[in-house]
Image (cartoon, rainbow, N blue to C red):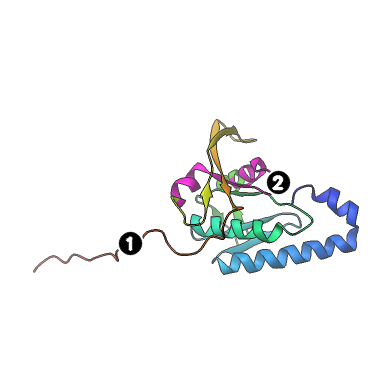
Amino acid sequence: IVDSTVLAQSVGDAAWANIIGSHETAIRHIVGSHGGTVVKLLGDGSMLAFESARAAVRAAVEIQRACDAEPYAVRIGIHTGEVIRTADDLLGLTVNKAARVAAAAAAGGIMISSTTRDLVGQMEGVQIGEPKIVLLKGLSDAHQITPVEWKGPTPTDTPTEVLAPPTSTRAGS
């Protein structure tokens, strides 16, 4: 949640607790509906995991749409990669980079890494913007990130391509 401390101070602790509770309920519902997992909720932030980059992007769009009517804005960053799983957390450079990609997003924005961009390809109902090269705090070199334009029509879960089922080849005996 962008400028969460300012908002919390302006509405007071009780109202802030209600806002956060409502936000977390929405996050859990949206993430679950896209097959994701809520790894942890941090009050004004969260760590979420998905089985696919496309599911993560669709959930991000839905989260932004849900927050559009709220008295706050969120910024979302998505990066895809290997992580280290503990009993109740995800660790590693992938997690750190996702946080830095999120920090590069504007209020109300969704930003994806080049890895995620490559994996999602074309998605029906999701417009991918123009990439930009940025420095991400604490990470070496420059990184390409791309905005997801979410204020258009609602995305569907209909795939844009149909893949044939895998065929098996059996060697003759």
146 relative position to 5: left or right = left
x and y percentages locating residue 53 in the rendered image: 50, 55
Query: Per the image, is 105 magenta?
Result: yes
x and y percentages locating residue 161 in the rendered image: 37, 59
State which quadrant residue 20 falls in: bottom right
Residue 163: give its label: 1
Query: Per the image, is 156 magenta?
Result: no
**What type is the residue that disc 2 sits on?**
Ala
Q: Main secondary structure of the magenta part?
A: helix
- Furthest residue to the top? 141
Picture residue at 18% right of the left edge, 64% below the top: 169
Judge by depth and name the residue closer to the eye, 115 or 64.
64
Q: Is residue 139 visible?
A: yes
Q: Is residue 141 above or below residue 148?
A: above
Bounds of the magenta span?
98-120
**What type is the residue that disc 1 sits on?**
Leu
Counting residues from the start of the chain, the first of labels 2 and 1 encountered is 2
Q: Is residue 92 visible?
A: no
Picture residue at 55% right of the left edge, 30% below the top: 141
Residue 84: give its label: none
Residue 107: give its label: 2
Q: Are marks 2 and 1 in contact (CB under 8 Å)?
A: no
Secondary structure under badge 2?
Answer: loop
Quarter containing the C terminus: bottom left
What distance separates the C-alpha of mark 2 from that of mark 1? 37 Å
